[in-house]
Image (cartoon, coloured by chain):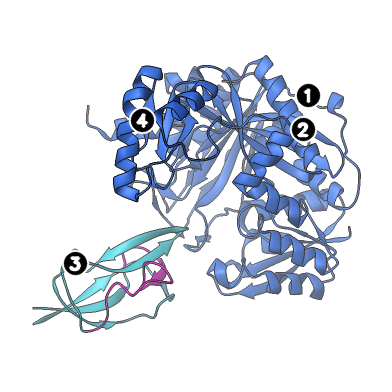
Chain colours: A blue, B cyan
Amino acid sequence: MKRLLVANRGEIAVRIIRAARDLGISTVAVHSTADADARHVRLADAAVEIGPPPAGKSYLLVDAIVAAARETGADAVHPGYGFLSERAAFAAAVADAGLAFVGPDADVIDRMGDKVRARQVAAAAGVPTVPGTEDGVDDVDAALAAAADIGYPVMLKAAAGGGGRGIRVVADEAELRTAFPAASREAASAFGDGRMYLERFVRRARHVEVQVLGDGTDAVHLFERECSLQRRRQKVLEEALSPGVDERVREEMTAAAVRLAREVGYRSAGTCEFLVDDDTHEFFFIEMNTRIQVEHPTTELVTGIDLVADQLRIAAGDPLPHRQSDIAARGWAMEFRINAEDPARDFLPSPGKVGRVELPDGPWVRVDTWLEPDVTIPPFYDSLLAKVVVWGEDRESAIRRSHRALAEFAVEGVPTTAGLHAEILGEEWFAAGDFHTGTLEKWLSDREEPA
Amino acid sequence: MSRIEVVSPIPGVFYRRPDPDSAPFVVEGQTIGADDTVCLVEVMKSFHPVQAGAAGTLVEFLVENEDVVEAGQPVAVIEAG
């Protein structure tokens, strides 16, 4: 690999260009007209304008990006996250052009991106998925038998339904006996189909992901990340490791992720997403993200491994750069996503002209950003301005240091979510690691209510 | 009769339809209520409906579908009746 085209923008394009430079690989940026002066464009060795501002006319154009790679003599393409990163057709187009795609093969992206097929891979690898019925159930006796296998509490949902309508949760057999006929009747009158799916209901679910690296044959894990703190299914802050995962679960879950990666012959960096039941400590595979993720720096800080550099090495044909026994997690890391959104106005996106910018730094603080003084934040792309990533020798010291780092963050001109993070850091439930996927939204709505 | 401008409160990309396969929210000459949605503005991957703000007849759009608009830019004109 001599020359890498980075098919992305913003902080991740900057991050990838830096990894390439560390390895002596020259870089090509692509950009829309809105990003002509952007940091990733200035940092790259060459740049190609690929279209007008809307992503559909620039960063999502497969042909324009492949053509830019050819014109500039690139021999590899890194898709970053978002945009084309999980489009199998893009991976295939890059490979067809004779270039190395920095990510898994198109057929692996396809297979792991499809929930049903990913569940089949999990079954073949002996990895648990959320227990439930494959088909609709139409009478009480069949439902009772299925629920006995699934384990209570059980969620009932109409086989023909959608959008959460008619979902009921039953705690035990007695409740199921009364609820099933009623739910089934309701479904029959609403959808003309009384069959119901049954699925395990998890009251307190954590969203935990295991980072893996594979070379197509073998795979290793780099421990897990805690991603439960979300708003509208968007992650807000992440940690490595998870405060809700004990050593036994960690060992089993990371082993499961490695089995999955080996089962599909996974090549590159990837993430296996699990739902962890906070009450029973059971874990279930949900899906695989076949790209580098926004929160990858937390894993880098606890393992000392550069995931993007490893992606490039693997795409260049190198075998796995690490043995599992060489990978250890030391200390704790947290990432705070600083978005151009106004928490006081229901997180209204706030693009616009920025004045002064002060970024935190100092010991064990890393900021991945594209932000600079006097830039204009365009309205066309996501609202992520910067990732403040902090390491500490344990979770408590990471929290203390994060207070310091966030207090140093200042951007003039646009509202950001930096202050919200500082508030979360001060919450007792956060300090105790006592949260699940519903916690943040509940906290935000309670906070809105006048005392 | 007074002419009232419908203004986009945010910068972004202007859309006249809820999605590419649907009919426009409003066509020129149509009578609308103050709370009716006139367009969507996409900002940072989220879509924000813009309401008419006054009842009357939508006489004119000042921008084309998928045009980039600024915060505070007039996008349509209503004749309040």
Looking at the rendered structure, whether the residues under marks 4 and 2 are on a common chain is answered as: yes
Disc 1: which residue? A328
Q: Mark 3 to mark 4: distance in Å?
A: 47 Å
Q: From where the camera sits, is residue B15 visible?
A: yes
- Measured in 3D between alpha carbons, the distance from the residue under mark 4 to the one under mark 1, in whole angstroms, is 49 Å
Identify the residue shown where x is 43% and y is 26%: A141
Q: Which residue is mark 4?
A: A180
> Is A171 in front, or is A254?
A171
Please, which chain is the residue tagged with disc 3 on? Answer: B
Chain of the residue under the numbered disc 4 shown in the image: A
- Which residues make up the magenta segment? B8-28
What's the mark number on residue A259? 2
Estimate the spatial distance between the alpha carbons at disc 2 and disc 1, rounded to whole Å. 19 Å
A196 vs A208, left or right, is left
Picture coordinates of residue A75 (x, y %)? Answer: 85, 64
Report the front residue among A197 and A232. Answer: A197
Q: Position of residue A23 (x, y in %)?
A: 86, 49
Asked if labels 2 and 3 touch by Cβ distance under 8 angstroms, the answer is no
Say which chain tag 1 marks.
Answer: A
Q: Nearer the viewer, mark 3 or mark 2?
A: 2
Q: Secondary structure at mark 3?
A: loop
Q: What kind of residue is marked 4?
A: Phe
Front label number (2 vs 1): 2
Three-letter amino acid code at the position of disc 2? Arg
Residue A122, picture quadrant: top right
Res B53 label? 3
Q: Is residue A20 magenta?
A: no
In the picture provided, is A26 more to the left or to the right than B1?
A: right
